Structures are given as C-alpha cells and as structure tokens.
Image (cartoon, helix red, strand yellow):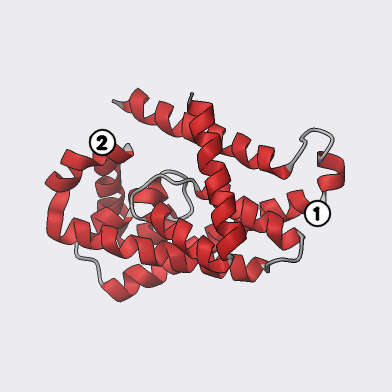
C-alpha cells in the first residue's frame, strides 16, 4: 500500500516537471520547503535526468529549486513568527513534524545562530522545517532569504547533478532498471521509509 502511494506521488512529481518545466520545479520545491515532506530526493534527480536529455540545464534546475525553497520557506517563517511553537505542536503531526524535531531545530538555532539556516539546507529531513525556528527567533528576513537561497541552490544542484550523471550513464545502468522512473520511485520509497521510521523511532 505504502509503495503504491509513493509510486503515485513520484509519478505525479515527474508529470509536474515534465509539463511545467522549471516552473514545476519551483512549485514542488516550494511545497517541500513549506514544512511538507515532499522529497527533494525525487524532485531534483528527475530534473537532473531531464538535463541529461538536453531538456533543461543544470544551473537552471538548481536556480529553480532554490527559488522554490525560498518561496516555500517564507510562509513557514511567518508561521513561526506569528503562530509560535504551540500551533506547530498541535498540527505538525499531520506532516510528521514531531516535538523532538522542533526541539532539535530550536537547539541548533540556539547553538549555532543564524548560519544554521544555511547548514540545515544541506541536511535531509531537517531542511524541511528549519524555517520555523527562524521565524520564532524573528531572524532578519534578508539574511534568512540569502542563507536559504544559497544552501538550497547547493542542495538542488547536487541532487540534479546526480540525476544528470545517472542519465548520462543510462546505457550501463539501464540493464538494472526498465525505466528511469523506477529509479526515482525506488529513491522515494527509501526516503519515505527512512523518514517515517526516523520519526516513529524518536517518539
């Protein structure tokens, strides 16, 4: 059942990118950065695969992904600023954000300061909800956007590069998979399984 859901999500992600191009990447990465765990580990490698086919550029997908992350992070920032922690504690469970996630984000922000926004954008899982404590702390918006953009660009570029290289070497890899779609779906299943296990284990 879980595999079917993940496969459906992966196929939807690929259809959005295929039909909307760079705009689809912006949309999907905005969703991912708005405290909704839509895996960038599916989004960006598939975009990278399209780079290998000449349909996009690596810089272009990295830029689109980073813009999407900024767009999606701003509502999460303001949620933290105006809603505060109680609001996320009440509703965060619906997107698998646990109390310990918030504790960790708060602790990282307190220990490392504003630079943690940049660092967290390079970390799976944490990157999805790190905007919230920045809002709670009322971090300077300009710095928040700059750190979010730079860290997200590196993350999106790196995942896109992996997808591009996989596409370029499809002649060697293709014997293990019928279509590249299966690679993306497998990545999605692995990510979601880890994400869910990680959260239930902590609780």
Q: Residue 90 placed where, x, y %?
A: 16, 39
The quadrant of the rendering that contains the C terminus is top left
The residue tagged 1 is 168
**Which disc, if any, is residue 184?**
none
Q: Which residue sits at x=23%, y=36%? A: 99
Q: Crowdedness of circle 1 by 10 Å Cα count: few (<14), some, many (20+)?
A: some
Looking at the rendered structure, the secondary structure element under dot 2 is: helix
Cβ–Cβ under 8 Å for marks 2 and 1: no
User: Residue drawn at (80%, 54%), measured in percent from left and top?
Assistant: 168
Q: Nearer the viewer, residue 87 or 28?
A: 28
Q: Which residue is mark 2?
A: 93
The crowd level at tag 2 (other Cα within 10 Å; few <14, some 14-19, many 20+) is few
The count of marks equals: 2
Quarter of image, res 195: top left
The residue lying at 44 percent from left, 64 percent from top is 68
Where residue 194 sits: x, y (%)? 48, 31
- Asked if residue 86 can be seen in this view, the reply is yes
Left or right for 198, reference 62: left
Can residue 115 be seen? no
Q: Position of residue 172 (x, y in %)?
A: 86, 42
Which element carries disc 1, helix, strand or loop? helix
9 and 91: which one is in front?
9
Relative to 93, residue 69 above or below: below
Q: Is residue 21 left or right of residue 116?
A: right
The alpha-carbon separation of the residues under discs 2 and 1 comes to 40 Å
For image coordinates 67% across by 57% down, the residue present is 48
Left or right of residue 15: residue 119 = left
């Amino acid at each position: 059942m879980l595999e079917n859901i993940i496969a459906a999500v992966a196929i939807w992600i690929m259809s959005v990118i295929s039909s909307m191009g760079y705009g689809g990447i912006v949309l999907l990465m905005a969703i991912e950065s708005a405290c909704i765990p839509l895996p960038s580990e599916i989004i960006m490698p598939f975009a990278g695969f399209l780079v290998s086919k000449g349909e996009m550029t690596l810089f272009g997908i990295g830029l689109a992904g980073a813009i999407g992350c900024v767009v999606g992070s701003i509502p999460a920032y303001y949620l933290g600023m105006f809603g505060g922690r109680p609001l996320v504690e009440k509703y965060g469970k619906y997107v698998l954000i646990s109390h310990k996630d918030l504790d960790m984000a708060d602790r990282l922000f307190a220990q490392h300061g504003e630079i943690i926004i940049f660092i967290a954008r390079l970390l799976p899982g944490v990157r999805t909800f790190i905007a919230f404590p920045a809002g709670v702390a009322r971090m300077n918006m300009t710095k928040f956007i700059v750190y979010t953009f730079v860290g997200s660009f590196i993350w999106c570029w790196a995942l896109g590069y992996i997808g591009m290289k996989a596409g370029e070497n499809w002649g060697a890899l293709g014997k293990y998979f019928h279509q590249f779609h299966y690679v993306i779906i497998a990545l999605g299943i692995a990510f979601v399984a880890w994400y869910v296990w990680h959260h239930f284990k902590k609780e």
